[in-house]
């Protein structure tokens, strides 16, 4: 079965599950949970800071989704990095991790 949107993932048989966060072509997309159930809105994140804002503003909720968003923010940092040596990349990743840690003290 062909899935109409990347936020659907096939489960067993014909059942579908809706993803709240996904990676597509070097970008992260999230379902804006602040708008649910009245409106369905997806947010495109190309910078780690946008994911941090999403966590802080409760646009993405729940410990598992927040953990995935944190991991994807590190992946975006690495993808967008202009570091030429591993030490520089590691420093960028540490800055990103600190930014994510400062968004919310608890899930």
Image: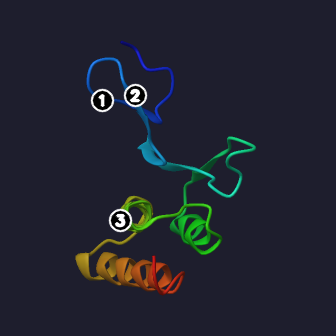
Tag 2 and tag 1, C-beta contact below 8 Å:
yes
Q: Quadrant of residue 96?
A: bottom left
Q: Which residue is mark 2?
A: 16
Which of the numbered marks, if any, corresponds to residue 71?
3
Q: What quarter of the picture does the C terminus occupy?
A: bottom left
Q: Which residue is mark 1?
A: 11
C-alpha gap between disc 1 and disc 3: 23 Å
- Residue 26 visible in the shown view: no
Residue drawn at (49%, 48%), measured in percent from left and top? 20
* N-terminal-most mark, 1 or 3: 1
Q: What quarter of the picture does the N terminus occupy?
A: top left
Helix, strand or loop at mark 3: helix
* Colour style of the rendered protein structure: rainbow
Closest to the observer: 81 or 2?
Answer: 2
Query: In the figure, is residue 80 to the left or right of 40?
Result: left
Instruction: List x then y, in percent, for residue 72.
Output: 39, 60
Instruction: List x then y, in percent, for residue 85.
Output: 26, 75
Instruction: List x then y, in percent, for residue 86.
Output: 24, 76
Q: Alpha-carbon neighbours of circle 1 within 10 Å: few (<14), some, or many (≥20)?
A: few
C-alpha gap between disc 3 and disc 2: 24 Å
């Amino acid at each position: 079965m062909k899935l109409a949107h990347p936020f659907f993932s096939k489960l067993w048989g014909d059942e579908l599950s809706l993803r709240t966060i996904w990676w597509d072509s070097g970008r992260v997309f999230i379902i804006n949970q602040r708008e649910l159930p009245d409106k369905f809105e997806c947010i495109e994140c190309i910078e780690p800071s946008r994911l941090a804002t999403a966590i802080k503003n409760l646009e993405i909720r729940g410990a598992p989704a927040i953990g995935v968003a944190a991991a994807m923010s590190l992946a975006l940092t690495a993808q967008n990095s202009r570091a030429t040596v591993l030490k520089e990349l590691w420093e960028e990743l540490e800055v990103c991790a600190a930014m994510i840690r400062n968004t919310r003290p608890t899930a």
